[in-house]
Image (spheres, rainbow, N blue to C red):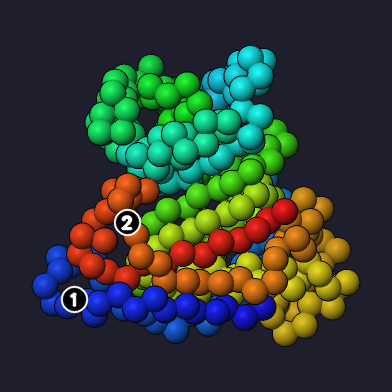
């Protein structure tokens, strides 16, 4: 699958005027991106076996599931479930909830300090008084929930509970641009197959084009593996056996729409998140990638 880069022509960025960390130069995608992604997808079960889910995450997930069940019982959320992974302050979660009143929207972040940040510009009373440090944070919107949790453990419990998302957002994930930090980027993390298995319309946004280009490479390699019948071609390691893929991951990867596209876009108010607003104020080019996971 080819990545198509669409340039909309924002004005040139004067990177020397910006604070450090704002501009991350485009690099060649890491040479091991495809191999690492395929390795993780084939070794998912052993990763899960060796990474037990902490009890506090189970408790938080249980409370989240109860919140969902309560709303489903009241016939809410007919539009489906939206997940905002790494939601930061949760601004994007609340905006999604506003834009999709027929959906239930869950924002997850590991930083309680960020989740607690005042969001009254979006919703009066959305200052959020968390019920407990580990518990879900209920914002003022009835169809949105902010949750403090570590994403890999949360994704795992969601997959094990049979969640199927309508849409999934990964907005401005930490880039970890040093080559040695490839495994910290989500597409090269052992939990990436869980993101695929959750399905739905997955949208990533970043100010670092390379991050999204690597996501295309990683996910295309998995799709290639999933659609082959044991013959994995050159992309995955030689020992790859497509039959070893878990059926849920295989089905999601096979459903990937052809022609994954990294596109530059022009952000405008209301900005979806603090990071988008910050980068737009600095007139940095921004990029997005949409993956249709079936
Ligand atoms: C660069 S910030 C972007 C926040 C927000 N999406 C935005 O656009 O403003 C990345 C966020 O991912 C969260 N994050 C990183 N790794 C995480 C993990 N393993 N589990 C949960 N959250 C994580 C961080 O706490 C941080 O809030």
Q: Residue shown at 81%/69% (left/top)?
A: 227
For the residue carrying disc 2, how many other residues have a C-alpha within 10 Å: few (<14), some (14-19), or many (20+)?
few
On screen, residue 143 above or below 10: above
Tell me if mark 1 has few (under 14), some (14-19) or many (20+) residues whose alpha carbon lies within 10 angstroms of its own: some
Q: Quadrant of residue 129?
A: top left
Residue 55 shows in this picture? no
Mark 1 highlights which residue? Answer: 15
Q: Quadrant of residue 43?
A: bottom right
Task: Indicate which disc residue 63 carries.
Answer: none
Query: Is label 2 in a helix, a strand or a loop?
Result: loop
Task: Answer with left or right where residue 181 lies relative to residue 233.
Answer: left
Question: What residue is disc 2 on?
Answer: 268
Asked if residue 22 can be seen in this view, the reply is: yes
Residue 243: % across, % down? 86, 63
Q: Is residue 170 left or right of residue 286?
A: right
Residue in view at x 62 percent, y 81 percent = 2
Element at badge 1?
A: helix
The earlier-in-sequence mark between 1 and 2 is 1
Q: Residue 200, position in %: x, y? A: 65, 49
Q: CA distance from mark 1 to mark 2?
A: 21 Å
């Amino acid at each position: 699958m080819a990545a198509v880069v669409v340039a909309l022509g924002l004005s040139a960025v004067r990177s020397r005027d910006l604070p450090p960390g704002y501009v991350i130069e485009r690099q060649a995608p890491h040479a091991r991106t495809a191999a690492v992604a395929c390795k993780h997808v084939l070794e998912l079960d052993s990763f899960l076996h060796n990474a037990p889910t902490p009890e506090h995450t189970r408790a938080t997930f249980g409370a989240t599931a109860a919140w969902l069940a309560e709303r489903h019982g009241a016939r809410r959320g007919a539009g489906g479930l939206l997940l905002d992974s790494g939601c930061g302050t949760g601004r994007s979660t609340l905006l999604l909830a506003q834009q999709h009143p027929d959906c239930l929207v869950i924002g997850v972040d590991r930083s309680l300090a960020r989740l607690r940040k005042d969001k009254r510009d979006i919703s009066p009373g959305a200052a959020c008084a968390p019920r407990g440090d580990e518990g879900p944070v209920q914002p003022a919107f009835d169809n949105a929930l902010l949750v403090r949790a570590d994403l890999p453990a949360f994704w795992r419990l969601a997959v094990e509970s049979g969640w199927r998302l309508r849409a999934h957002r990964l907005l401005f994930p930490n880039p970890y641009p040093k080559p040695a930090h490839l495994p910290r980027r989500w597409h090269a993390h052992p939990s990436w197959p869980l993101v695929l298995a959750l399905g739905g319309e997955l949208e990533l946004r970043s100010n670092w084009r390379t991050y999204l280009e690597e996501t295309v490479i990683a996910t295309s390699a998995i799709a290639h593996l999933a659609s082959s019948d044991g013959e994995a071609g050159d992309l995955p390691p030689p020992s790859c056996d497509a039959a070893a893929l878990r059926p849920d991951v295989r089905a999601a990867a096979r459903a990937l729409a052809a022609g994954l596209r990294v596109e530059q876009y022009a952000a405008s108010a209301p900005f979806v998140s603090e990071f988008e607003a910050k980068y737009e104020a600095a007139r940095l080019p921004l990029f997005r990638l949409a993956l249709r996971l079936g």
